[in-house]
Amino acid sequence: MAWTLFSVPTTKRAELDAVLKDDLLSRQSQKLREAAAVGGPSGTVYVLVEGATDAVRRADELLAAVGTQLPPSDAEPLYRRFKEEEEAASSGMGLFFTEE
């Protein structure tokens, strides 16, 4: 699955929300995190879009108008962190719904 990761100033949140409502992008996995919560700069939101290759290309085009695509050296560790959080949340919910 293809993915892209952008840094968007919180001052452009309304524009970001409009971009993420794009017909193609709205059908992909989208994750937003306050950058400061994961060691990034305050006043910034990290945006991860994951999905079909053509949708990720579209995300790159549209998100470039509101933010900056992170270079691979920064994006790779953040992507792994997003995935680890997702897996931890999933396993936690599994424990919540497990019958004894």
Image (cartoon, rainbow, N blue to C red):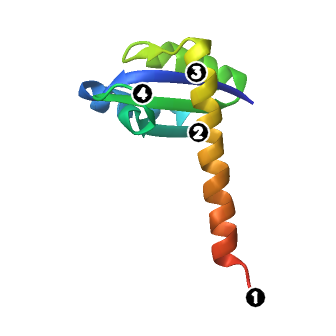
Mark 4 vs 1, N-terminal side = 4
Q: Which kind of residue does numbered mark 4 sit on?
A: Val
Label 3: which secondary element = helix
Q: Which kind of residue does numbered mark 2 sit on?
A: Phe
**Do the numbered discs 2 and 3 sit on residues whose CB atoms are within 8 Å?**
no
Residue 20: x %, y % from top left:
45, 33
Q: Is 1 above or below relative to 90?
A: above
Q: Which is closer to the viewer, label 4 or label 1?
A: 1
Q: Which kind of residue does numbered mark 1 sit on?
A: Glu
Q: CA distance from mark 4 to mark 1?
A: 45 Å
How dense is the environment of label 1, judged by Cα within 10 Å: few (below 14), some, or many (20 and up)?
few
Mark 2 vs 3, N-terminal side = 3
The quarter holding residue 98 reads bottom right
Residue at mark 1 = 100
How dense is the environment of label 4, judged by Cα within 10 Å: few (below 14), some, or many (20 and up)?
some
Q: Which mark is residue 19?
A: 4
Q: Which mark is residue 75?
A: 3
Mark 2 vs 1, N-terminal side = 2
Taking depth in this image into account, of 85 and 20 the one nearest to the observer is 85
Taking depth in this image into account, of 17 and 35 the one nearest to the observer is 35
**Do the numbered discs 2 and 4 sit on residues whose CB atoms are within 8 Å?**
no
Taking depth in this image into account, of 43 and 32 the one nearest to the observer is 43
Q: Which is closer to the viewer, label 3 or label 4?
A: 3
Residue at mark 2 = 82
Residue shown at 68%/20% (left/top)? 54
Label 4: which secondary element = helix
Q: Along the horizontal axis of the image, is 90 left or right of 15?
A: right
Label 2: which secondary element = helix
How dense is the environment of label 2, judged by Cα within 10 Å: few (below 14), some, or many (20 and up)?
some
